[in-house]
Image: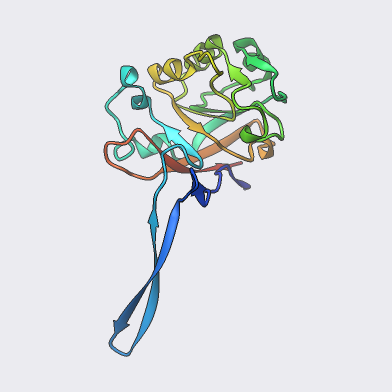
Amino acid sequence: MKLIDLTLEMPLREDRKKTAKSFDRPLKFENGKYTAVQHIFTFGSTVGTYIDFPGHIKEADDGLRAIDYPVEKLFRVKTAVIHLDRKSGSGAVSASDLAAAAPKLHGCKAIVLNALGRRRFDGIKARSVWLTPDAGEWLASKGIHLFVSDIYEREPVFTGIFAILFKAGISTVCWPVNLHKLTSPYAELTALPIRFKDVTQVQCRIVAEF
């Protein structure tokens, strides 16, 4: 068994402000004392690797939140892996591109798309490689409920890819890393978010097993 951590580390700063502050808390016990180190966190929901549930778009809201999303849909999910090698600025990735590179799905409930080869999502011009609407419809037709990718939207004119995926009940993981290290066409994927109440977008730890 091999494990690959697909999670981006949390940055120390967001918008020039610290994301974590630490302080010491002296504590006493019966025979002595010690100093506990505690932290205060301040960051937005799109820092680090994060998951969007369908309710992130109100028009696709299925009522589920991070606190009650079924954990069995996020734990050791059978996953197909698609590899491309697109360069910065190379434009659209279509349904035919995905179909040509995909392994047989064999009942997989998740898909990982490594569209950028060894490049990270932040190693290209932002949103200069994107998924077309027909790529979204292709994904929606495959019966998956989890999608992990290093590309999604286009700028400045959006394609609506998230709306397509969320309306199909597909949760998306954004800003993953190490996708090129998935050397097997299949893996088991675990994506565990923090269980915040009334939240549809939140940081998560994501690990692939193969």
Relative to 48, 113 lies left or right: right
The tally of labels here is 0
Left or right: residue 30 compared with residue 175: left
Q: Residue furthest bottom?
A: 31
Along the line of sight, the residue nearer the viewer: 14 or 165: 14
Q: Residue at horizontal 51%, vertical 13%?
A: 159
Position above or below: 185 against 194: above
Residue nearest the observer in this picture, 89 or 49:
89
Would residue 197 appear left or right of 176 to someone viewing this image?
Answer: left
Q: Quadrant of residue 169?
A: top left
Seen at 66% across and 14% down, the residue is: 97
Residue 1 in percent (x, y) is at 62, 48
- Residue at coordinates 31% horizontally, 21% vertically from top-left? 58
Q: Quadrant of the C terminus?
A: top right
Image height of 51 relative to 102, above or below: below
* Residue drawn at (66%, 37%) of the image: 182
Picture coordinates of residue 27 (x, y %)? Answer: 32, 78
Q: Quadrant of residue 69?
A: top left
Q: How is the image coloured?
A: rainbow
